[in-house]
Amino acid sequence: MTYQVLDARWLSPNVKRLRVRAPHVTHNCKPGQFVIVRALVDGERIPLTIADSDRAAGTIVLIVQVVGATTKALCALEAGQAILDVAGPLGKPTEIHPVRHAVLVGGGVGTAVIYPQAKALRDAGARVSAVVGGRTKPFVILEEELGRVCDDVFPCTDDGSHGFHGFVSDRLKRLIAGADVPVDLVLAAGPVAMMSAVAEVTRPLAIHTVASLNPIMVDGTGMCGGCRVTCGGHVKFACVDGPEFDAHLVDFKELTDRLTAYRAFENCAMERSA
């Protein structure tokens, strides 16, 4: 069985949105979960967040950033082509509880994680704000889509070309300080350094903060050990115990050190696929 790509479009110069027919995934999927995808017969299996789903149509949305050989192959797909394998849903869903004001922070392709969370929190009655960032304006994704499900959306760019000039963590700090409805939940998804910075903004304020550790997953099954994370002094695996954890308990320094271990292998794979 293959999984047909119904439509494909670029969201930014290196990020593509794929709508894929995968009815078995839509039957049970919830915000925060992911699928394991294999693009080629001899390709690696990679985890991708379920950015959206339509149970009636039997479709899911995957948002893929070109990072290595496999993501390059996925982003080359066009409507009418197919993905070889889509397994899921996997991982523990986001815990949605009644809150007054939730702020979702998305960095780059991590914004794909916060979109379904925003819809679920809105449906639960929360005020929902989103802070989304990218290097420059073209790299800020899903701003329009989030605008339809959030009360406020605050774009940020490193170079000031769109929205707030600076990091999402700095915009979050300003949002918390000026919020008319107190912020009692922050969800963060994006680069590890970004999530670490968000945790340090909310830590002194004792605001419950959750980090989605999708960026550290490798095979998504717990077998490889690559997504090992120390959380509250205990070793966890992001793919089977998460991917979401209390950001104030995560050892982000350890994560940062481990992520560099695969860089040389990925560079070699990209060179072979060129």
Image (tube, rainbow, N blue to C red):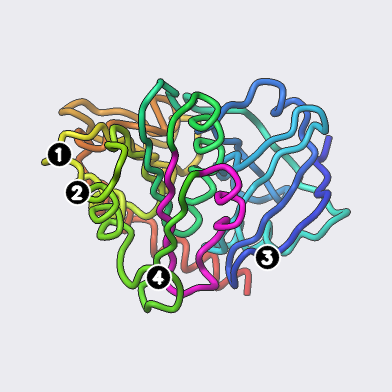
Q: Secondary structure at mark 4?
A: strand
In front: label 1 or label 3: 1
Q: Is residue 135 magenta?
A: yes
Residue, disc 1 = 205
Identity of the amino acid at label 1?
Answer: Leu
Q: Secondary structure at mark 2?
A: helix
N-terminal label among 3 and 2: 3
Q: Amino acid at mark 3?
A: Trp
Q: Disc 3 vs disc 4: Cβ atoms closer than 8 Å? A: no
Disc 2 marks which amino acid? Answer: Val
Q: Earlier in the sequence, mark 4 or mark 1?
A: 4
| Disc 3 target residue | 10
Query: x, y (%) of residue 85?
Result: 72, 39
Query: In percent of the image, x 80 and y 49: which residue is there?
Result: 5
Residue on which disc 4 sits:
157
Mark 4: give few (<14), some (14-19) or many (20+) Cα within 10 Å. Answer: many
| Closer to the eye: label 3 or 4 | 4
